[in-house]
Image (cartoon, rainbow, N blue to C red):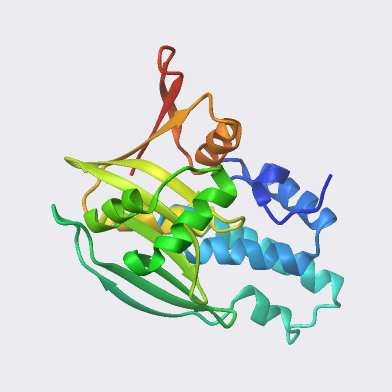
């Protein structure tokens, strides 16, 4: 198996039993360094909004911490403590969404990197086009991107002033339809966790995503949304689309 820090590739999921989660973590550690897996799990936990999910991940972090101490003679003063629990400073300015869009900004400092979740403005047009072109062979033009930005319903993840991904969405009563979601590798999970947290405080009860089954990346997208605990709702055999939903 190729080394990767994506825990889901080893069968890890908070929906699994404790034994299955620990076996998945052991497998991940086998193909990676223990510190790398700890760092990955801790980062995901920090952005997790669901209290039960945070509790499960905290238990798994403690389990890995015990493994580390056993491997290193029980040294409580090792630098691993800093890797597992990086200092996080956050400043939040979150306003509710309305018909004219959203005003969103949340900032974190994680392992000396500045991570910002924010709605995007026109300064990110080129970055959006580059992301689309690089990862999805998109034929979007600048005018279309400007229209989307002006509507205000685009949230991005920006790391050290570089756009790593974004989510475009539409409001439908108390539901959200994600119309476009794209990130660089390793940034999809934290971006989704943030937008779910944001939607939940804005009284959104359901998130909907439509996957084009004819897209060459369809399987990859479906697997990602399953890992985010979405469920298959219906298949449109005429349009070749899969509708997935998640209640929050």
Q: Is residue 248 found left or right of 82 in the rendered image?
A: left
The answer to whether residue 213 is visible is yes
The answer to whether residue 14 is visible is no
On the image, the x and y values in percent for residue 213 come to: 51, 24
Report the label total. 0
- Position of the C terminus by quadrant: top left
In-front residue for pair 10/144: 144
Question: Residue drawn 21% across and 66% down?
Answer: 95
Question: Residue drawn 67% across and 52% down?
Answer: 6
On the image, the x and y values in percent for residue 199 come to: 29, 53
Q: In this rendering, is residue 115 above or below 79? A: above
In-front residue for pair 163/11: 163
Q: Quadrant of residue 246?
A: top left
Q: Is residue 78 found left or right of 237 in the rendered image?
A: right
Question: Residue drawn 40% across and 59% down?
Answer: 194
On the image, the x and y values in percent for residue 197 come to: 35, 57
On the image, the x and y values in percent for residue 125 come to: 39, 61
Q: Is residue 132 found left or right of 120 in the rendered image?
A: right
- Position of the N terminus by quadrant: top right
Looking at the image, which residue sits at the far left?
99
Question: Residue drawn 55% across and 61% down?
Answer: 44
Q: Quadrant of residue 116?
A: bottom left
Q: Is residue 183 found left or right of 91 in the rendered image?
A: right
Looking at the image, which residue sits at the far bottom?
77
In-front residue for pair 156/78: 156
Q: In this rendering, is residue 210 above or below 4? A: above
In-front residue for pair 24/32: 32
């Amino acid at each position: 198996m190729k080394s990767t820090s994506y825990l889901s590739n080893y069968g890890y999921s908070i929906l699994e039993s404790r034994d299955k989660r620990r076996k998945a973590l052991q497998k991940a550690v086998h193909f990676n360094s223990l510190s790398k897996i700890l760092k990955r799990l801790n980062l995901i936990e920090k952005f997790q909004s669901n209290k039960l999910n945070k509790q499960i991940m905290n238990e798994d972090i403690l389990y890995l911490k015990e493994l580390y101490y056993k491997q290193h003679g029980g040294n409580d003063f090792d630098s691993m403590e800093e890797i597992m629990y990086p200092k996080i400073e956050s400043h939040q300015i979150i306003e509710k969404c309305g018909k004219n869009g959203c005003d969103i900004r949340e900032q974190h400092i994680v392992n000396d990197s500045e991570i910002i979740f924010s709605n995007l403005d026109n300064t990110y047009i080129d970055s959006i086009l580059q992301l689309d072109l690089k990862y999805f062979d998109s034929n979007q033009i600048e005018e279309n991107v400007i229209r989307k930005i002006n509507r205000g319903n685009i949230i991005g993840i920006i790391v050290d002033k570089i756009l790593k991904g974004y989510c475009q969405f539409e409001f439908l009563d108390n539901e959200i339809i994600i119309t476009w979601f794209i990130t660089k590798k390793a940034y999809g999970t934290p971006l989704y966790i943030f937008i779910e947290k944001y939607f939940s405080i804005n009284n959104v009860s359901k998130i909907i995503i439509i996957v084009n089954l004819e897209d060459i990346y369809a399987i990859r997208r479906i697997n990602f949304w399953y890992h985010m605990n979405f469920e298959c709702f219906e298949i449109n055999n005429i349009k070749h689309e899969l509708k997935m939903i998640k209640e929050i």
